[in-house]
Amino acid sequence: MSDPVPQTPASVPAPRILAASVDGCTLVAVVGKATFRLAPAFKQATQAARLAGSEMIVVDMAQCLSMDSTFMGGMASLGFAVQKAKDACLVFINLSPPAQGLLKGLGLLRLLRTYPAGSLPEGLGGLDALVANLQPVAADELGGSDLAAFMYDAHETLTRADPANVQKFKDVLAYLKQDMGGPAAAPKTC
């Protein structure tokens, strides 16, 4: 048995969001490490899909190496928005077992329709036309209080997704609230 090949910085894909829309379906591909820095581009891509009237939003996580809590909060926010508006079908495909575990640990599997690698929702045809049209999504980089507010919203959304997350993120929320210039207050339980 050979030793696993360590990933060098050159072999790790640059984090980015790619998107394409064809015939009322939008494909959003998450590439690399999905962190708070990538979350604004994810939000922009999915909001654009909804505003354009996409009936199906497919988020491909095949090339996603890891996710932080801010990014997962963005996923939850999208899940809530689609669920409330009932304006599109939303699915996450090609999730690795560790990614499934992260989402399960935060109670997000009750909110998001997810499919492991190699499994697609029934009725979802080939994605070749979408993959061929994928383009990078550029979003303004957030800084200072704007970034703190974005991160606060993502973590607050996680606490709405599962009340158990209040305990997990109360210190993060208090810190971010203070960073936004407000008094450090503990989040309310649901």
Image (cartoon, rainbow, N blue to C red):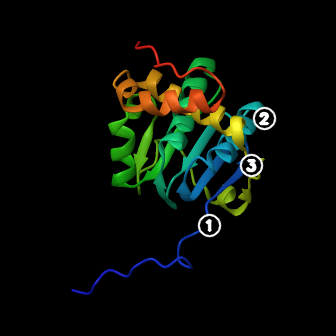
Q: Which residue is mark 3?
A: 141
Q: Nearer the viewer, residue 82 or 167?
A: 167
Q: Which residue is mark 2?
A: 52
Q: CA distance from mark 3 to mark 2?
A: 23 Å
Q: Nearer the viewer, residue 130 or 109?
A: 109
Q: Earlier in the sequence, mark 1 or mark 3?
A: 1
Looking at the image, residue 91 lies above or below residue 17: above
Q: Circle 3 — which element?
A: loop
Q: Circle 1 — which element?
A: loop
Sort mark 2 into few (<14), some (14-19) or many (20+) by Cα contacts within 10 Å: few
Looking at the image, residue 40 lies above or below residue 118: above
Amino acid, disc 2: Ala
Assign the C terminus to one quadrant of the image. Answer: top left
Residue 169 coordinates in the image, percent (x, y): 42, 31
Outermost residue on the left side: it is 1
Q: Earlier in the sequence, mark 2 or mark 1?
A: 1
CB under 8 Å between callouts 3 and 2? no
Q: CA distance from mark 2 to mark 1?
A: 27 Å
Amino acid, disc 3: Glu
Residue 176 coordinates in the image, percent (x, y): 56, 32
Mark 2 or 1: in front is 1
Q: Nearer the viewer, residue 79 or 73?
A: 73
Q: Is residue 5 visible?
A: yes
Q: Circle 2 — which element?
A: loop
